[in-house]
Image (spheres, helix red, strand yellow):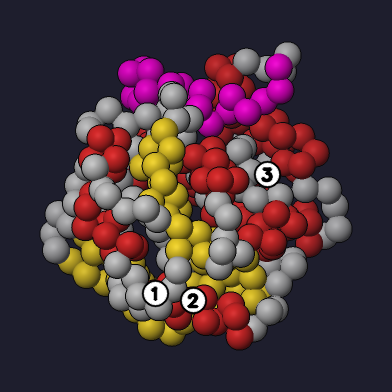
Amino acid sequence: MKLSVFSCWHNRLHDLELSVRSVLDQQGVELEYIIVDDASTDGSHERLLAIADPRLRVLRNAQNVGFTRSCIRAVEASRGEYVAFHDAGDLSLPGRLAKQVALLDADPDVVAVGCLVENHTLATGDRRPWDPRGGEELGLEMRFTHGEVMFRRAAYDAVGGYRPVFYHTQDKDLWFRMRAVGRLDMVPETLYERRIFADGIQGDMVRQIRQGIFSNLMLHCAMERLAGRPDPVEKQGALALLTQPPNHRFTRRARILIPAMLRGRLFSDARRALDVAPAGMLSWWMLATLILLRLFTRRP
């Protein structure tokens, strides 16, 4: 099979059929579409099962395991030479998949391909273009947003795929490692609509700060590899969160976490992020506490 497409769904009933159909209605390419439902409770699972299409496979997690582990499960279940991601609720515009397949077919040195993206904020109706070109940070020439990317399954396997430690920025960690085995490219057309929901990460400061912590870890790992040193996550696992250098920008912003801590929210989220530690290692709550102490004791 040439192409597998996958999505990871959790309680995003908004325009579900519209999003799924934007994949299934793609022309010029044969595909299978794998959706991992991460224990949704809002009726998403039932709605997904009601979509009658033999190309669609819906896998359900018995309990909520988080986005990264759902991605890993989806790719493991895929059978395609190429694998494309489509984020829950977004729209793949006509021609996206066929044009990305054509680019990968034409250039064997390309391991991942994106496209121009339109960011659509549903609450305001605002639409803004996103061009991934010009990143050039540590040699990463494309600033993909994840949802619009198609990659070679062989390259994904060669670098070890998504890493469970990365509760956030799991995509950029993957692109950095894929960059070591091939080139990133894009179709210079707007082929993907990234829909920004009110309950997404953009409207949640605590999640944004958490994302910043994992972004810092992702960059730390990339710089260590470029310097010829062992990757901290490969060497230390979840403990790499403690050994990464401080990011002073997030040190200042992290003080907003205190109210969230008192509500218990941060630690409930941290448990899912950090329970990848081997049995017998520090418990998740101790690890989360140490990370916070590290943040609060660093001077800006």
Q: The residue tagged with tag 3: helix, strand or loop?
A: loop
- Residue 96 — which label? 1
Residue 263 forms part of the magenta stretch: yes
User: Could you tell me how far apart the alpha carbons at marks 1 and 3 are, in whole angstroms?
Assistant: 39 Å
Residue at far right of view:
228
User: Could you tell me how far apart the alpha carbons at marks 2 and 1 are, in whole angstroms?
Assistant: 6 Å
User: Could you tell me how far apart the alpha carbons at marks 2 and 3 are, in whole angstroms?
Assistant: 37 Å
Residue 106 is drawn in which quadrant?
bottom right
Circle 3 residue:
245
Q: Residue placed at 50% from the left, 27% from the top? A: 272
Circle 2 residue:
100
Q: Position of residue 295 (x, y in %)?
A: 56, 34
Q: Amino acid at mark 1?
A: Arg
Residue 247 forms part of the magenta stretch: no
Q: Which residues are magenta?
A: 259-279
In which quadrant will I find the N terminus? Answer: bottom right
Asked if marks 2 and 1 touch (Cβ < 8 Å), the reply is yes
